[in-house]
Amino acid sequence: MLKRFCNWLLCQKLGWTIEVTEEHPKKFIICLAPHTSNWDFFYGQLYNKAIGLNSNFMMKKEWFFWPLGSLFKKMGGIPVYRQKHTSMTDSIAESAKAADSFRLCITPEGTRSRVEEWKKGFYFIALKAGIPILLYGLDYEKKVIRCTKTIIPSGDLEKDMREIKLYFKDFKGKNPENFTIGNV
């Protein structure tokens, strides 16, 4: 019932189209871009419910205050402590390897503001865990959620990141001025 309602709300009422051609294995990372607005979270969660996908997501720890913190954790949120220099990618990769099923959504820009250099944690988690990266784009101009490419990390960071960034070059975020793929 919830799945049907969320699908109706996202596609019929709000007018979004879903274009997903990639297989979703038991374990994967979702690289979601562009991330230019808090609305991205709303549409991402609505999409997850519409297709019956349960995935965790990473969010800066400042959002995990009472009462939202409990809600975000229940929804699959993982707080990110940006000031701590811990090897979060190692511990998440180990969790992914040990789990029967693993789905984690990460926005590579790491913020809603314009950044020239993307974070690479999602890539290193996938590489260390030996799992694919599904590229998901939110295009507000066309009102489409698209996933038509999967990347298997090769270990050649520069080559793989170039391919990932080029996938997102034509997507328009809610605030398009806040999105760039940087120099590729």
Image: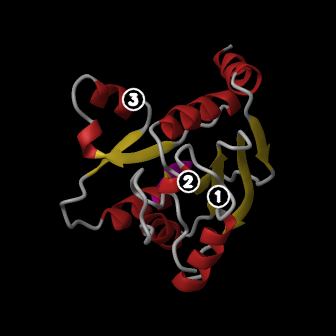
Is residue 162 something that shows in the picture?
Answer: yes
Looking at the rendered image, the disc whose residue lies closer to the viewer, 1 or 2, is 2
Q: Residues within 10 Å of mark 1 (few under 14, many from 20)?
A: many
Which residue does the image show at 52% across and 58% down from the upper left? 179
- Relative horizontal placement of residue 3, taking residue 130 as reference (left or right): right
Q: Secondary structure at mark 3?
A: helix
Distance from disc 1 to disc 2, alpha carbons, whole Å, reads 14 Å
Q: Position of residue 168 (x, y in %)?
A: 64, 62
Residue 123: percent from the left, percent from the top? 50, 69
Q: Is 116 rendered above or below residue 38?
A: below
Residue at 65%, 42% in the rendered image: 140
Residue of label 2: 34
Circle 1: residue type: Leu
In the image, residue 99 lies in the stretch drawn in magenta? yes
Q: Residue 147 in magenta?
A: no
Residue at numbered disc 1 = 134
Which circle's residue, 1 or 3, is located before the other in the chain? 3
| Disc 3 residue type (three-letter) | Lys
Magenta span covers which residues?
A: 98-105
Give me the disc on residue 74.
3
Question: Earlier along the polypeptide chain: callout 3 or callout 2?
Answer: 2
- In percent of width and height, residue 131 lies at 58, 65
Asked whether 118 or 4 is in front, the reply is: 118
Quadrant in the picture for the C terminus? bottom right
Q: CA distance from mark 3 to mark 2?
A: 25 Å
Residue 115, position as x, y percentages in the image: 42, 64
- Residue 159: name its quadrant: bottom right
Residue name at image x 77 percent, y 47 percent: 20
Q: Which mark is residue 70?
A: none
Residue depicted at x 65% and y 58% = 134
* Above-or-below relation of 7 to 182: above
Query: Are the residues tagged 1 and 2 within 8 Å (C-beta)?
Result: no
